[in-house]
Amino acid sequence: MRICDRHGCDEAGKCPAPKSPNSPDRWYFCEKHAAEYNQGWDYFEGLDKEEAAARAAEEKRDTSGYRESVFNEWAGSGDGSRTRDEMRALDVLECNAHSEFDEIKKAYRRLAKANHPDTNQNDKDAAQRFQAIQAAYAVLRSAEERKTWKGV
């Protein structure tokens, strides 16, 4: 096992970090020191404006296919087709990441009925769950509306 390259640290160095731009040489840090190192990292350091713009355009070109796959609905849940808030909302509604909106609506109705304050009087936890369910459904409903509005 490799030790963290930060002086005085004896934790495992599992996180590789480049020593300089365009260099194959790497430092190996623990998570704490990798975060500290990356905080001040400037990807475009040492490049003039034209070189930085060319590199940024190249990076964007190389990753454009991922964005295009979302448009064509080839994308799944882990590739940016759903936001972090949508994923949390799906968890609240006990749905999986690939659920269609009809399934989400059924889950919302089932959970809202089970946790409604009128059917669970004097249960403060049920009222909080009901509010969370409503908020989760609102997030997913607005995402569905944006999706259908954009024609995606």
Image (tube, helix red, strand yellow):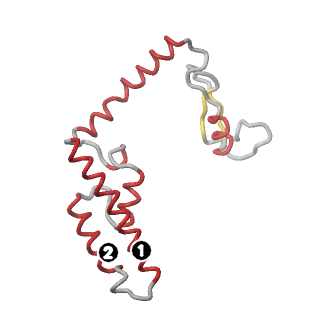
Which residue appears at 60% of the width and 35% of the height?
16
| Residue that appears at 21% across and 45% down | 149
Q: Identity of the amino acid at label 2?
A: Leu
Q: Position of residue 41 (x, y in %)?
A: 62, 29
Tell me what residue is drawn at x 23 percent, y 41 percent: 150
In the image, 41 versus 116, the foreground residue is 116
Dot 1 crowding, Cα within 10 Å, few <14, some 14–19, many 20+: some
Q: How many marks?
A: 2
Q: What secondary structure is found at the residue carrying circle 1?
A: helix
**Residue 43's mark?**
none
Q: Is residue 50 left or right of residue 6?
A: left
At a point 71% along the width and 36% down the height, the residue shown is: 5
Looking at the image, which residue sits at the far bottom? Answer: 122
Q: What is the three-letter code of the residue carrying label 1? A: Arg
Whether residue 102 is situated above or below residue 111 in the rendered picture: above
Residue sitting at the far right: 8
Q: Quadrant of residue 4?
A: top right
Indicate whether 138 appears above or below 36: below
> Any mark on residue 111, and which?
2
Residue receiving disc 1: 129
Q: Is residue 85 above or below residue 112?
A: above
